[in-house]
């Protein structure tokens, strides 16, 4: 109870992290809605990089959403804070530069509850952007897990299944990524579909991976079987 009383009279930082599809944005929106029910003024922000669903909302993969402001740099976020704001939510924080850490500190020093959600690791399993520092300074950390699409265990990693092998940022969701556990995660992205120019390799790949990605390969697989009379 002492802990609750202290939190209600001073600012603090909460971080919600985990892999993609672990429900980070859902959890952020749940906490923001609780603050709204308590009649606290809330403001929600996200980086302009995140344009997956909407530029004016924070939206989870299952279409749950609340209005938000898109900002390019963390300092732009500070300029938008209303005097009466009690709770600030920041989604996809991994896309901001390190100055988001100082901004979060400043907001907490003003007595604001700062709720930050973001990917703790990129698709190679490396700490992502400013997230390690945010985790270090936070009063409260929630690490969520998804479900590994290969083995069904708790997934802590994000597997990139298409796109660039080197770029840390490819904004997207189910078309480019899936959740994997440590054992099934492949940071070298060897599971990327081979080129269509090599149908035998594609067929072998499809047979190996069909249980987890049937929609991607079923059409190609059928056309190869027809053309080449594979058994
Ligand atoms: Zn697994």
Image (cartoon, helix red, strand yellow):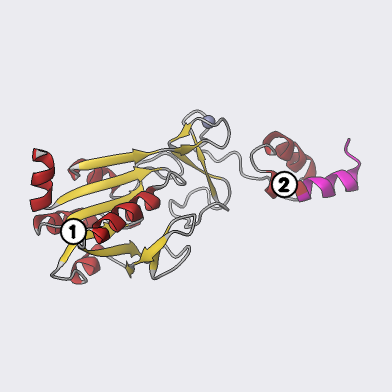
Of 81 and 187, nearer the camera is 81
Q: Earlier in the sequence, mark 1 or mark 2?
A: 1
Please say if 189 is above or below 51. Answer: above
Between residue 118 and residue 37, name the one nearer to us.
37
At label 1, counting other C-alpha atoms closer than 10 Å, the crowd grade (few under 14, some 14-19, many 20 or more) is: some
Residue 59: x percent and y percent? Answer: 42, 60
Q: Is mark 2 within 8 Å of ligand 1?
A: no
Q: Choose top left, top right, bottom left or bottom right for residue 103.
A: bottom left
Q: Is residue 184 above or below residue 129?
A: above
Residue 136 visible in image = yes
Tag 2's secondary structure? Answer: helix
Query: Is the CB of the residue bearing disc 1 within 8 angstroms of ligand 1?
Result: no
- CA distance for labels 1 and 2: 45 Å
Magenta-highlighted residues: 219-231
- The residue located at (74%, 50%) in the rendering is 196
For image coordinates 19% across by 66% down, the residue present is: 78
Say which quadrant the C terminus sits in: top right
Q: Quadrant of the N terminus?
A: top left
Residue 49 showing in the rendered view:
no
Which residue is under mark 2? Answer: 217
**What x and y, as percent, mark residue 100?**
23, 57
Report the front residue among 16 and 51: 16
Residue 109, image x, y percentages: 9, 55
Residue in the foreground of this view, choosing between 202 and 101: 101
For residue 103, the mark is: 1
Residue at x-position 74% and y-position 43%: 202
Q: Main secondary structure of the magenta part?
A: helix
């Amino acid at each position: 109870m002492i802990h609750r009383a202290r939190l209600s009279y001073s600012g603090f930082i909460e971080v919600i992290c985990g892999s993609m599809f672990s429900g980070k944005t859902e959890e952020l929106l749940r906490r923001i809605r609780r603050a709204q029910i308590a009649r606290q003024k809330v403001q929600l922000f996200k980086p302009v990089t995140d344009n997956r669903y909407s530029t004016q909302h924070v939206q989870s993969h299952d279409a749950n959403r609340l209005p938000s402001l898109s900002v390019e740099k963390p300092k732009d976020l500070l300029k938008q804070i209303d005097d009466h704001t009690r709770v600030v939510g920041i989604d996809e924080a991994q896309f901001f530069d390190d100055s988001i850490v100082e901004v979060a500190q400043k907001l907490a020093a003003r007595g604001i509850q700062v709720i930050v959600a973001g990917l703790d690791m990129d698709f190679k399993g490396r700490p992502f952007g400013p997230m390690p520092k945010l985790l270090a300074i936070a009063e409260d950390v929630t690490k969520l897990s998804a479900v590994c699409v290969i083995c069904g265990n708790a997934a802590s990693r994000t597997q990139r299944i298409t796109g660039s092998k080197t770029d840390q940022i490819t904004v997207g969701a189910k078309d480019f990524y899936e959740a994997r556990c440590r054992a099934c995660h492949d940071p070298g992205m060897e599971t990327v579909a081979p080129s269509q120019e090599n149908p035998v390799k594609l067929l072998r790949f499809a047979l190996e991976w069909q249980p987890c990605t049937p929609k991607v390969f079923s059409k190609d697989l059928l056309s190869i079987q027809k053309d080449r009379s594979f058994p």
